[in-house]
Amino acid sequence: MAREHLWTLGESWVHGIRITRVYAHLIGHGLHDQVGEVNPCLREERSESSIMPLHESLLVMETMDRIREQFERRDVPPFLRP
């Protein structure tokens, strides 16, 4: 799909304020759920999601770091190393 077809822009005026909307056409299995949550957070000027608060994101990152450390050790079979 061509790049210009991935985004749609919408523009309107409300009480003299220009409102621009960007619509992303979601393709594949990437981070579209996360993007779908970030957009309302940004609109509402929230710094974190109620679905996945910052402390939970940090716990996931710490867990992923521990998993990565295990793969870096020599006791991991070569076929399991990145």
Image: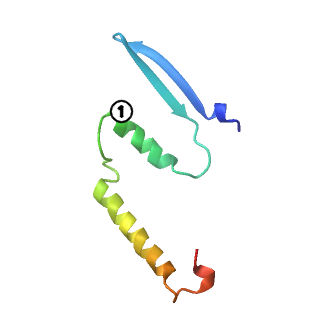
Decide if residue 77 is on the left or right side of residue 13: right
Q: In the displayed structure, would residue 59 be above or below residue 67?
A: above
The residue depicted at 33 percent of the width and 47 percent of the height is 49
**Where residue 11 sits in the image (x, y, percent)?**
48, 18
**Where residue 73 sits in the image (x, y, percent)?**
49, 84
Q: In the displayed structure, would residue 28 be above or below residue 81?
A: above
Tag 1's secondary structure? helix
The residue depicted at 62 percent of the width and 49 percent of the height is 28
Point out the image quarter for the N terminus: top right
The one nearer the camera, 3 or 44, is: 3
Point out the image quarter for the C terminus: bottom right
- The residue that disc 1 covers is 43
Decide if residue 50 is on the left or right side of residue 39: left
Query: Where, by quadrant of the figure, is residue 44 drawn?
Result: top left
The residue depicted at 53 percent of the width and 86 percent of the height is 76
Q: Give the residue type at disc 1.
A: Arg
